[in-house]
Amino acid sequence: MEPPKRTVELPKLVAEELKRLRREFPFYIVLQSKNGNHYLYKHSTKWDPQNKKVRTSRTYLGKITDDGKFLRKVLRGIEQKEMTVLPDDKMPLDEIDKTLLTVLSMNARADLAHYGRQLGMKPEEAYRRVKNLEKRFGITYITEIDVEKLGYLIALPKNNLTV
């Protein structure tokens, strides 16, 4: 007896939408098909140091209809609506992101947890937003060291230099 197949032939429009969403979501997504419905999940793994094993979790994101439309997860009692997913570089900045960028431009070593609380966010949310901004805009940090103060550079008079 042959074991049951675990793969399902997806309708063409569903497969195209899944391919598009995989390019646009910054995390690993999984599609589960049940009774003709196609459900989309965020799949994540995390090391559990206490139990010394990997924990996996799935978070429901929404479903893809047979006509290829992505319906995002919404609160109970509210009808699902079509979601337009924009690439990161096309997403408009909200006021919180603009404020965080201003804080970073003035002091890259600022206490983000403090600023996050002042903006009404948990510290984890502030760190996550900053990481997303760093990734989106290619923000890097440079350390400047005064090597003369460290004694690594000896200044030579200009007339003693030879080429």
Image: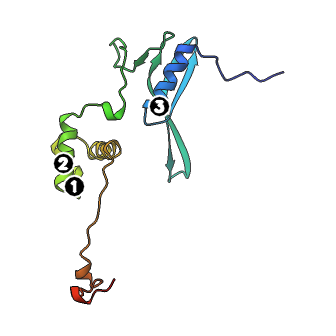
- The residue under the point 21% across, 55% down is 111
Look at the numbered disc 1 and give the secondary structure of its residue.
loop
Label 3 CA crowd tier, 10 Å (few <14, some 14–19, many 20+): few
Label 1, label 2: how far apart the Cα atoms are: 7 Å
| Three-letter amino acid code at the position of disc 1 | Asp
Q: Residue 151, how many percent across, how many down?
A: 27, 85
Quarter of the rendering occupied by the C terminus: bottom left
Look at the numbered disc 2 and give the secondary structure of its residue.
helix
Label 1 CA crowd tier, 10 Å (few <14, some 14–19, many 20+): few
Residue nearer the viewer, 62 or 70: 70
- The residue under the point 60% across, 16% down is 10
Is residue 20 shown left or right of residue 148?
right
Q: Which residue is mark 1?
A: 111
- The residue under the point 57% across, 18% down is 33
Label 3, label 1: how far apart the Cα atoms are: 33 Å
Label 3, label 2: how far apart the Cα atoms are: 32 Å
Q: Which residue is mark 3?
A: 23
Residue 115 shows which numbered tag? 2
| Three-letter amino acid code at the position of disc 3 | Arg
Label 2 CA crowd tier, 10 Å (few <14, some 14–19, many 20+): some
| Three-letter amino acid code at the position of disc 2 | Tyr
Residue 57 shows which numbered tag? none
